[in-house]
Image (cartoon, rainbow, N blue to C red):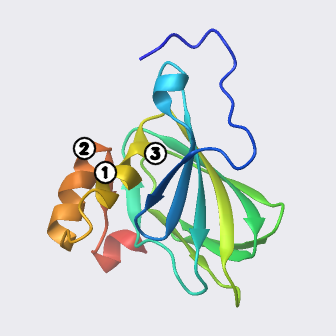
Amino acid sequence: MTTFDKAAFSKADAGVEAIAFGRHIIRIAADQTGGSLGCFEAEVPAGEGPPFHVHEKEEEFFRVLEGRFAFWCNGARVDLTEGAVICVPRGSVHRFQNIGASLGRLMVVMTPGGFEGFFPAVAQEPDANPERICQIGEQFNIRFVFDAAEAA
């Protein structure tokens, strides 16, 4: 990992593509920032989004680039549209869903970085079953929540 003493950047239409749970573009990887943060764009089809989950070690910042999204965090829901932002604290049970009629796009920044590597790791195993995806997730400090009581 490099020292974060120079600007990390990603030019327009740059980044590393990962097709896992939709299309993700890794714009800035943790190794570019000395682990301080990671940044990616997510394309989310209408009606789609991840299940409830917890990032054990990272805060998460979202900016809605296109579309309409519902975000749930520790039992509260907020609906956001293009240009809106939301920050989710580490350890919170959260999820989001594209509630629009067309493809939506999010910019996501995680701090500290590293989680952005989850999508390329899953993409390397396109036939992974849910149990295997959870195992990969453990390597990136994400825990999926399937207990309705915990997600409420």
> Of marks 3 and 1, which one's residue comes earlier in the chain?
3
Q: Is residue 121 left or right of residue 8?
A: left
Q: Which mark is residue 139?
A: 2
For label 2, count other residues whose C-alpha is less than 10 Å away and answer few (under 14), some (14-19) or many (20+): some
For label 1, count other residues whose C-alpha is less than 10 Å away and answer few (under 14), some (14-19) or many (20+): some
Q: Which mark is residue 116?
A: 3
87 or 67, nearer to the observer: 67
Looking at the rendering, which quadrant does residue 62 occupy?
Answer: bottom right
> Of marks 1 and 2, which one's residue comes earlier in the chain?
1
Q: Are marks 1 and 2 in contact (CB under 8 Å)?
A: yes
Instruction: Tell me the residue at 57%/14% (across/down).
Output: 4
The quarter in which the C terminus is drawn is: bottom left
Spot occupied by residue 28 in the image (x, y as percentages of width and height): 58, 36
Instruction: Tell me the residue at 23%/61% (across/down).
Output: 125
Spot occupied by residue 143 in the image (x, y as percentages of width and height): 30, 56
Instruction: Tell me the residue at 84%/61% (across/down).
Output: 83
Q: Is residue 7 left or right of residue 83?
A: left
Task: Look at label 3 and name its amino acid.
Answer: Glu
Task: Look at label 1 and name its amino acid.
Answer: Ala
Q: Nearer the viewer, mark 3 or mark 1?
A: 1
Instruction: Tell me the residue at 32%/44% (across/down).
Output: 140
The correct choice, above or below, for 129 with respect to 9 in the image is below
Q: Which residue is the site of mark 1? A: 121
The quarter in which the N terminus is drawn is: top left
Q: CA distance from mark 3 to mark 1?
A: 9 Å
139 or 12, nearer to the observer: 12
The correct choice, above or below, for 111 with respect to 152 in the image is above
Q: Is residue 97 left or right of residue 35?
A: right
Task: Look at label 2 and name its amino acid.
Answer: Gln
